[in-house]
Amino acid sequence: MPSVVIAGAGLVGALNACFFAQKGWDVSVYEFRKDIRTMKHVQGRSINLALSQRGKSALEAVGLREYIVNQGVPMYARLVHNKDGKTFSRQPYGKPGEHIVSINRRHLNEVMITQAEKSPNVKFFFEHKVKSIDYEKKQLVVQCTSQPSRIPSFGRKPSQQENPEIHVEADLILACDGAYSAVRRSLMAIPRFDFSQEYIEHGYVELNILANNNRFAFEENVFHLWPRGHFTLIALANKDKTFTVTIFAPFTEFEKHMSTTKDVLSFFEENFPDAYKLLGKEHITETFNRVKPQPLVSIKCSPHSFFDNLVLMGDAAHAMVPFYGQGMNCGFEDCLVFSETLEEYGNDIASAVQAYSKKRVNDAHSINDLAMYNYEELKDLVNRNSYKLRKKFDTIMNMIFKNSWIPLYSMVTFTRIPYSEVIERRKKQDKVVSGILKTTSLFALIGIVAGIYSNRKVLGL
Ligand code: FAD
C-alpha cells in the first residue's frame, strides 16, 4: 500500500487521516501539540464552528456525518438583535428546514483522531514539530519537542538541540499545518510560487454565556447577530446549553473603547444591552483582563501542489476571514476533492496532485473573496433595506427557478457547487437584477415576481 505523511493533526489533518485510513494506506501524522484528548485546556481558535454542506459531505465519506451532526446544535436563521436590546429581526438561512450546525471544535477534532486511529496502519506522532520540507529529497523534516529523559543537569540549562531532526519520507505529503504553515514557508523560495496575505483591521475576543438553570439563556436554534456598523457581536449555542459569544472589532476600537474595565463594560452595555446582562460584568472584566484580541488573516497561494507528491490543504493553502463560516468547510471539502481526484486517476499520485491543484486553487481564491464580502455583510449590510429586499427577491426567484436561481448564501452553504462557479452564477444574477432595475424599482420587481409566483400554475411555470 502507498504511504502518506500528514503535517498537522488539526481539523483538516485529522480528517485526511480518516480518508487515508479508509483507503488502507500507511498513514503517519506529525502534530506539534500534545494529544488534545489528554489535555485539560486546549489553546487555540474559536470554541465552536458552523458546519455546513461541504463539511457534512466530507464527514459523510468517512462515516462520521451522522454522529457529528447529532453532537451539534442546528441553526435555521440569523436573529439580528437591535440596539434597544428588546427587538429582533429574523432572517432564515434558506428554505424551510435548511440549516447549519454549531459544532464544538475540540470534540470534532478528537472524534476524527480517534476514528483514524482505529486503523492499525495509522500512527499519530504528537509533540512533533514539522520544521520544513527537504525538497531535494522530498522529505518532511520533523523534530520531537517533548523533553527526553536525561541525566541531571545540575542547574545547567538543557540544550535545545537534544532531540535530533528526523527526515520522514512517504509517497504522498499533505501539509495541513494551518495558517502559519511551516511547510508552506519552506516552499517560498520556489520560483513562480504566488503568495499573498492580508490581516484585516479587525480582531476578535471570545466570551461565554452560561446555561440558565440548565436552559439556554437565548433561543438556541439561531445564529445571534448584533451588527453595529464597524464592529459586531455573534453568539452560537453549544450542546451543553452555553453560548460562545465573539466580538469582532477593529484593533483601534479595542484600544479606544475596551482597554479599561469601566470602558469595556459601558461599551457592552450601550451596544449589546441584552447580551451584556447575560454575559455579566464579572465575566466581561475577567475575559478582557486575561485575553488580548486575536488577529484575523486571509491567505492565498498558488499552486497548492509541488513536485509530484506534495499538497497544501486547509488553512495552510487558504486561510480566510471567518465571516462566511467556510474555513473548515472548505478545508474538509479539500480532503473530499483530493480523495475523489485520486480515485479518478486510479491512485496515480503525481497526476492527481497536479489535477487537484488546477481544480482547487480557483475555488480557494473564490471563497477567500466571498468571505471578505460577507465581512461587510455581517457588519452592516444585514441592516439595510436594499439588502433585505434583494434577499426576498432571491428567495422568490429560487421558488420559481429552483436550480437556476439559488441565492448566494445558499449556493455557498447548502450545495457543493464549486466556489468559483458560485461567483460566476451570482454575477449573472446581478446582471439580470441591475438590468431590470434600470426600468423599475426593487419593490415593484418583488411585487411582479411575487405575482408571477402565486399565479405560476396558471402561467404553466
Ligand atoms: P488548524 O485548525 O489551524 O490546524 C493546524 C494544525 O497543525 C494544528 O493542530 C497545529 O497545532 C498543527 N501545526 C501547526 N504548525 C505545525 C508544525 N510546524 N508542525 C506540526 N504541527 C503543526 N470555519 C468554518 O468552517 N466555520 C466556522 O464557523 C468557523 N469559525 C471560525 C471562527 C474563528 C474566530 C476563526 C479564527 C476561524 C473560524 N473558522 C471557521 C475557520 C477554521 O477555524 C479553520 O479554517 C480550520 O481550523 C482550518 O483547519 P486546519 O486543520 O487547516 O488548520
Image (tube, rainbow, N blue to C red):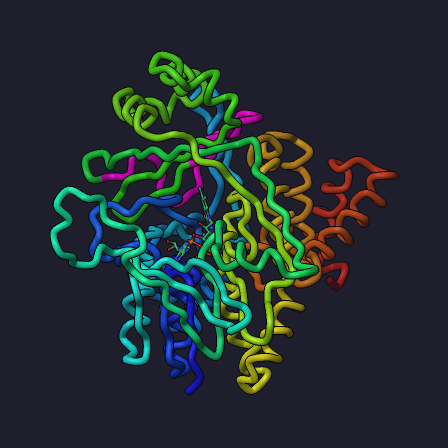
Residue 304 placement: quadrant: bottom right
Task: Judge from the rendering whether residue 341 lies leftward or rightward of residue 72; answer left or right.
Answer: right
Task: Pick whichever, 276 or 297, lies toward us.
Answer: 297
Task: Specify the farthest residue to the right.
Answer: 439
Image location of residue 14, percent across then percent down:
38, 64
Q: Which residues are magenta?
A: 215-234
Image location of residue 30, percent across then percent down:
36, 64
Q: Is residue 357 above or below residue 10?
A: below
Image location of residue 81, percent across then percent down:
46, 29
Task: Specify the farthest residue to the top.
Answer: 262
Image location of residue 64, percent across then percent down:
36, 68
Q: Is residue 142 above or below residue 250?
A: below
Residue at left 36%, top 17%?
265
Q: Was residue 226 drawn as part of the magenta stretch in this picture?
A: yes
Q: Is residue 257 above or below residue 166?
A: above
Task: Pick whichever, 121 or 228, lies toward us.
Answer: 121
Q: What quarter of the picture does the C terminus occupy?
A: bottom right
Query: Quick check: can you spot residue 402?
Result: no
Task: Judge from the rendering whether residue 165 lies leftward or rightward of residue 316; answer left or right.
Answer: left
Residue at left 61%, top 42%?
372
